Image (spheres, rainbow, N blue to C red):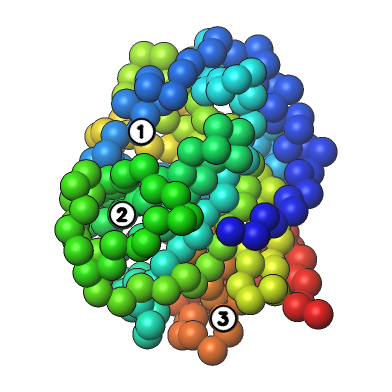
Amino acid sequence: MTELDVDLPAAGRDIGLAAAGFGATGIAEASTAAQADRVDYRYVATVADAVALVGTLTGHYRALDVGGSRLREYRTTYFDTPAFGFYTAHHNGVLPRLKVRLRSYADSGESFLEVKQKTGGRRTVKSRVPFTESDALPAGREVPGLHLPLPAELHESLRTTFHRLTLVRADAHERVTIDVGVRFSVNGETAAFPSLAVIEVKQDQRAPSPVIEHLRSIHGTRAMISKYCVGMAALRPTLRQNRFRAALARLAPYRTISAAT
């Protein structure tokens, strides 16, 4: 996979600095808190608002720390059917629906093939297995460790990079992720969102959350759209995107576009 350069906003570095005051947690605990079967809430905000949010959470959460790093770089390749069936299902509100992606962690060098299934009631079921770019994509086959077989025909549809801070609730099964420096790429064209923060709260069941309470107090914007759909709609304009136009308009102030040369 070709690396995408990510210009991390100064405020993104401030998020990492703010998280320095949190107790540390490891990957095992963070993975347990993520819950394979979970309820998700997603918000969008400015990076500056995300920095202020982190400052209110000391004592409630611990920060994922991997080798001394709390702001980790994620690289993701998404796959779709030849007719972009996964994207279309999301656009049309079809349930259940799938996402298939290869997620790589720049700091550890680990990569995983992941399948996410969105069911009713805002629930997401995710499974993943270790995978490398040199492995053949097991399209059309059942894979031990994945809860669903992959469709027979898949191709690369989108690449993303971002930096993530992960916080784990000290007294409940809750994980919070804050993504900054979000960038998408298709065929050499990129869409970057340098001042955007995507904040997700992941719980095993709906419950009060200090993060959601703070975001509501500052009138944070609840977002139903996924990164995959934002990137696809922004960089593949021939696809249907009526359902996403309002979200794209809302995110436009955060965005810069660079075309392939």
Q: Is residue 6 left or right of residue 126?
A: right
Question: Which image quarter: residue 145?
Answer: top left
Q: Residue visible at 76% across and 44% down? A: 8
Query: Disc 2 marks which residue?
Result: 115
Query: Disc 3 marks which residue?
Result: 236
Q: Which badge, 3 or 2, is on the more N-terminal residue?
A: 2
Q: Is residue 79 left or right of residue 51?
A: left
* Depth check, front residue: 141 or 165: 141
Point out the frontmost of discs 3 and 2: 2
- Classed neighbour count for the residue bearing mark 2: other residues with Cα under 10 Å, few (<14), some (14–19), many (≥20): many
Could you tell me residue 249's position as x and y percent? 63, 71
Q: Amino acid at mark 1?
A: Ala
Marks 1/2 in contact by CB < 8 Å: the verdict is: no
Element type where label 3 sits in the image: loop
Residue 219 numbered tag = none
Q: Which badge, 1 or 2, is on the more N-terminal residue?
A: 1
Q: Which badge, 3 or 1, is on the more N-terminal residue?
A: 1
Q: Amino acid at mark 3?
A: Arg
Could you tell me residue 51's position as x and y percent? 69, 32
Q: Amino acid at mark 2?
A: Val
Q: Quadrant of the C terminus?
A: bottom right
Could you tell me residue 237's position as x and y percent? 58, 84
Q: Is residue 109 left or right of residue 50?
A: left
Residue 34 numbered tag = 1
- Classed neighbour count for the residue bearing mark 3: other residues with Cα under 10 Å, few (<14), some (14–19), many (≥20): some
* Depth check, front residue: 152 or 23: 152
Question: For the residues marked 1 and 2, what is the alpha-carbon distance in whole angstroms?
Answer: 15 Å
Asked if 207 appears above or below 100 in the picture, the reply is: above
Q: Quadrant of the N terminus?
A: bottom right
Q: Residue visible at 48% across and 55% down? A: 133
Q: Residue visible at 78% across and 44% down? A: 9
